[in-house]
Structure formats: structure tokens, C-alpha cells
Amino acid sequence: MTSLLIDDTITMERHGALRIYHRRALAPGAILEALESPGEALKVSGKSVTRRVGSWVVKQSRPQAGLGILKRTVQRSRYRRGWIAGNFLERRGILVPRPHAFVEKGRFGLLIASALICDYLDGCRNVEEHAAQLAEKTVTAFLARLADAVNALTTTGAYHTDLSGKNIFTRKGETFYFIDLEGIVLEGLYSDSRRMENHVQLYDSFCDLWPPELLDPFIVRMLHKTEDEASWIRAVHENQKARRAKHDRKTIGQD
């Protein structure tokens, strides 16, 4: 298992039941204050609450009991992904919200809760929101820059399990930041099946805005030269339709 003490710029301190991994230049008191601050809610799910606290984003797990704590303990490495992946990618020049601290709350070997603190991407929005306001003549260049950013990410060996447009932020369509760091897997190869999954996720993010004439070259730009482009594009189209149909069935079932 990869150490949470990424390098000598990171230290760990205990505060009661808390283990705080943080950059040495950062005072633990500021981290504790951020954990207690109500901040501004950005996203709330059944598992976590993400909020803005000043120049930081705090993604904090929601309280769980019983089997929830046991599951969190057994899957401890999964909850550490964001901290480990964020530092891994930043050190390789990939733009991510800079991780500043990771906190685990535990007792008697059980992981009760965790929190990741990283930069708030001020002045950024996700690429789907940005894309919706692009003039047609600027789309091709925007997609080329996005494809190059994705290529840089995957070249590190990292695999984002949900590489949809909502998890890629941009500043003016020029630079791209990958968020939802807990969804990044560093183990294993970036296989063809993983590449296909990512391409389908990206295609699905933009296919309601732009036609295949614009999106197919975007997908091809992220392919190995050895791939059969026509076959790959057909597979992306088919898998995207299946993905959308599955989503629609799920949505209808929830109504």
C-alpha cells in the first residue's frame, strides 16, 4: 500500500482520534478549523459532504455506524485514493486541485471518518458548462486541448473511473483540472477497456451539444496510432447509446 507520507514535504500529527497528514508549511490548527467550519455546501451525497471553506474545498465523509464503519475500515485504501492520487498527479505536472491535508478519524483500528482538503478552483467551471457557451468556430480547438490534457493524464498510468465532463474543470477553456480524485485508480495498466470507458464517458458528456463530425476527431486524438479508428469510433457510438439508455431506465425507475 502506498504511504500517506508521500515525501518529506508531508508530515503526520495526531489530535485525539484524528490522524492529520498535511504539508509541513500548513498549521494543523487551520485544518481543524476548516473541518469544523460549515462553509458553503458544494455537493451533498449519501456518503459525503463537499463544501468550500475560504480558498479550500473540504470533502468530508458523512457519519456512519455499524456496518458502515466496518465497510469503511475494510476498504480503507479506497478512501485514501484522493490524497494519494492528487499528490501523484501534481508531482507529474497534471493539473488537479492541490491536496493540502488528509484526515482520518479512527478508534481501536476502525476507520470512522475521513476528509480531504484541497484547493478551491476559483474562476473555473466544468467543461460541460464551458462547452455549452462556446461559439462553433472555437469548438475544435477546445476539444483538441481537452484531448491533450486527457492524454497527459493517462500517460501517467492513472485511470479516472468517472471521466465525465462534470469531473473536469477548466479556466477559460485553456487549462484543465481533474477533480473527484477519489475516483482515480493508480494500480494496473491503462487498458483498452479502461480507455473505451473513458471515451464513452467523454462522448456522452458532449454528444447532446455537438455532432459526430466534431466529436469523432476528438476521440481519435486520444487513440493509439495502432488502433483501427473506424472500429473504435463505432464501438464508442454503440457503448454511448447503451450508457444513455441505461441511465434513462434508471431515471424512469426513480420517478
Image: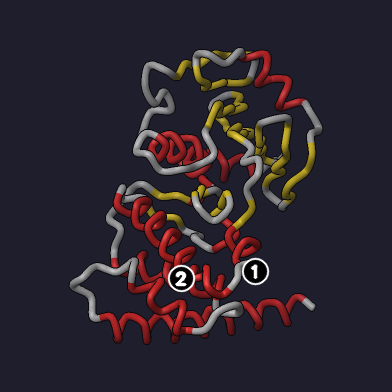
Q: Is residue 83 above or below residue 208?
A: above
Q: Is residue 40 left or right of residue 162?
A: right
Nearest to N terminus: mark 1 or mark 2:
1
Secondary structure category for the residue under label 2: helix
The answer to which quarter of the image holds residue 59 is top right
Secondary structure category for the residue under label 1: loop
Q: Where's the C terminus, which quadrant?
A: bottom right
- Give, as a three-letter code, the residue at label 1: Ala
For image coordinates 56% across by 26% down, the residue present is: 101
Q: Nearer the viewer, residue 110 or 47?
A: 47
**Residue with the most extreme front position:** 137
Mark 2 highlights which residue? 140
Q: What percent of the width, then of the height, locates residue 87?
A: 43, 34
Labelled disc at residue 132:
1
**Residue with the most extreme left position:** 226
Q: What percent of the width, then of the height, locates residue 62?
A: 71, 41
Q: Is residue 51 left or right of residue 167?
A: right
Q: Where's the N terminus, which quadrant?
A: top left
Q: Is residue 56 above or below residue 165?
A: above
Looking at the image, is mark 1 or mark 2 nearer the viewer?
2
Q: What percent of the width, then of the height, locates residue 55?
A: 67, 31
Q: Is residue 27 above or below residue 100?
A: above
- Characterize the local packing of mark 1: few (<14), some (14-19) or many (20 or more) Cα atoms within 10 angstroms: few
For image coordinates 32% across by 80% down, the residue present is: 232
Q: Nearer the viewer, residue 232 or 222?
A: 222
